Structure formats: structure tokens, C-alpha cells
Amino acid sequence: MTPTTDRNEALGVLDALVGYHLRRASSVFGSDFGRTVGGEGLRQVPFAILSVIAANPGIRQGAAGEALGIKRANMVVLINELVEAGHVDRAPAADDRRAIALTLTASGRQTFEGATSRLIEHEDQLLADFTPGERETLIRLIRRIEAREQPPGD
Amino acid sequence: MTPTTDRNEALGVLDALVGYHLRRASSVFGSDFGRTVGGEGLRQVPFAILSVIAANPGIRQGAAGEALGIKRANMVVLINELVEAGHVDRAPAADDRRAIALTLTASGRQTFEGATSRLIEHEDQLLADFTPGERETLIRLIRRIEAREQPPGD
DNA sequence: TATTGTTATACTCTATAACTATA
DNA sequence: TATAGTTATAGAGTATAACAATA
């Protein structure tokens, strides 16, 4: 068993659970996100949506949500917000009149790229004491956990 | 840079950000928590509180919250819930009449121990394809991220 | 003055159910 | 019938500000 550190000895069994530590570590990145790009009102989830649209111009709303594990009902509000902020354009999908194709506006692209470069910079700072190999190992192990995700019942 | 997998090629830059993957992996554990012990209405945060109290009988409400990164204002409601569920006892602190000392009731201990053993079992399943060394590495790397947490401004 | 707990409140993310319009 | 998007609503976690009692 991994030895309990002084800092965590108050946690009890919790300190041995990977799920707990993932939660706290995720929160560290979340706070850092807020400090880094929160000033412009960009949050983690909307930023993630911008990234998916940037990488897949014309992607449908449902597909974008699916890539991120966001339910359709919740995508509506999030996309509304991004459209109202002038970051995303909605267009009817060419082949399916029920569907909506999403693209970034010039402003959206600019916001996304600015946020991205600052986030990468901050992530480099946050992981400054990680060797490239450790960083590679970390992301590889985390991805294996993600792969265990259960499909939603919907 | 870590190669992009097929599964994640829709994510764009996001796929290179450790923060995003931590968030998704944490969510996998969160869903698993719900499937495992959600039936009794036990959630991640209340469970974490039970663990801290179990490891530190008589701990003050504020200290318990601090160990978990939960703000004082939010602890009140959470402790109320655990007291009403019969899992936690409140007692005035011996040396400070402003403070409250928390202990587990018999029911709280039983609930906590049952949940713990099932959670460990499920965590073992979720990480079944991790070698002991990989698991050790994972938790060690995550703890180093946690250590980068910024103190709250309060 | 500072700290412990409390109340009230707001925001974000997530979840479910019922609806519409298209397929 | 099934799917894409929508609306409404609720639950959970977190954040801030103002307050009472005590230190």
C-alpha cells in the first residue's frame, strides 16, 4: 500500500482510494482553470465544447455532446450560451433537418486559441516537477481509467 | 506528446490537457461510486466526511472540512444531513465552546465500513488491468498534483 | 479582533421526463 | 418507431457575504 503522507493522515481509508485522489486533483486543475482563463468568463465545460467544435467544424450538437459525455438536454443551454457570447454559429445540418451543425466564429476561434495557449502554459507550470516520462505515464494511466467508462442508460 | 487515440480524436487540443482527462476519469469513479453504494443514499462527499471522522473521532467540524477542502458554510448542511441520518453525533468541544466535536454513531460506523469494503472491491475491479506497480505509480503522481493545490482565499 | 459555526443565496454541472419536428 | 433538439425541473457541489457566539 502506498504510504500515507503527513498531509493526508487525517483522511483515513479515503487516502487509499484512487477515486478520491482523482477528485481532488481534478479540482486543483479546475481552480487553476478559473484563475487562468476565468476572467473572460470561460469555464471548463464551455472550453471543452469549443475545442471539439474547433477540431470538427460543422459537428452536430449531439455528436459534440457525446464526445464530451454531456447529455443532449444540457448541451442546449451550453450551446445557447456560446452562441449568445458570439463564439459559436449554429447552422442547419445539410442532410438532416432535425440536426444542427456547429462552427466557431472568428471571436470563438480567437477566444479558444488564447485560452488554449494560456492553459498549456499553466499546465506546464502545474506539472513543472514532472519529467516528460512521468507526464506521459500519468496521462496514459488516466486514459486507461477513462476507457472503463460505462455507457449511460439514457 | 502522447499520441491521440481514435476514441479521443474528436477532442482536439483538449486531448492533450491533463486537466481534462483527470476530470473525465474522476467522473468514471463518481459514477461507479453511485452504482456501488448510491443505493443507500451515500454520496462521495458525505462518505469522505465519514472517513475523516472515523479516522479522527472527536474532530472539529472545521478541521474535518479543511482536510477535505470543504468550506465551513457547506459543512454545516452536510453534517446536518449525516446527523439526521443517524450516522454522526455532534458534541460540544471540551476546550472551545464555539466548536463542535464529531464522532460516528454505531450506525455511521457500520454504514461507513460496509461502503468502504464494497468501494475497495469495486476499485479493484475498475483497476483490474493495472499492475500493482502501475497503481502505485498512478496514486503517487496524482498526489503530487494534489500537493500543488492553492490555499483558498476565504 | 479573530475564529467557529450558521444562514441565505447564487452558480455550475448533471440527471430525468415529456415534448416537437423530422427521419 | 426512432432520433435530434428542446423545455422544465431537480439534485449535488461549491462559492461568497453577513451574522451570532465565543476566544
Image (cartoon, coloured by chain):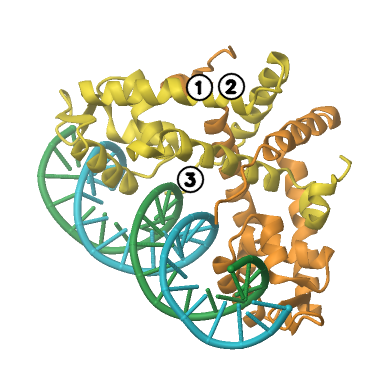
Chain colours: A yellow, B orange, C green, D cyan
Q: Chain of mark 2?
A: A
User: In this view of the protein, can residue A90 be seen by the observer?
Assistant: yes
**Residue position marked by numbered label 1 in the rendering:** A120
Q: CA distance from mark 3 to mark 2?
A: 33 Å
Q: Which mark is residue A124?
A: 2
Q: CA distance from mark 3 to mark 1?
A: 31 Å
The one of A9 and C22 positioned closer to us in this rendering: A9
- Looking at the image, residue C2 sits to the left or right of residue A59; the answer is right
Mark linked to residue A152:
3
Residue C6 in picture, x, y percent from top left: 55, 80
Residue shown at 34% from the left, 25% from the top: A112
Which amino acid, by three-letter code, is at mark 1?
A: Ile
Q: Are marks 3 and 2 in contact (CB under 8 Å)?
A: no
Q: Residue at horizontal 47%, vertical 38%?
A: A35
The tag earlier along the polypeptide, 3 or 1, is 1
Choose mark 3 or mark 2, whichever is in front.
2
Q: Mark 3 and mark 2, same subunit? A: yes
**SS for dot 1:** helix
Q: Residue at x 27, y 20 (%)?
A: A57
Q: Nearer the viewer, mark 3 or mark 1?
A: 1
Q: Position of residue B114 (x, y in %)?
A: 78, 65
Task: Give the answer, above or below, for where B113 lies relative to B150.
Answer: below
Q: Which quadrant of the figure contains the N terminus of chain A?
A: top right
Instruction: Name the kind of residue labelled 3 in the image.
Output: Pro
Image position, residue B36 (x, y; %): 66, 56
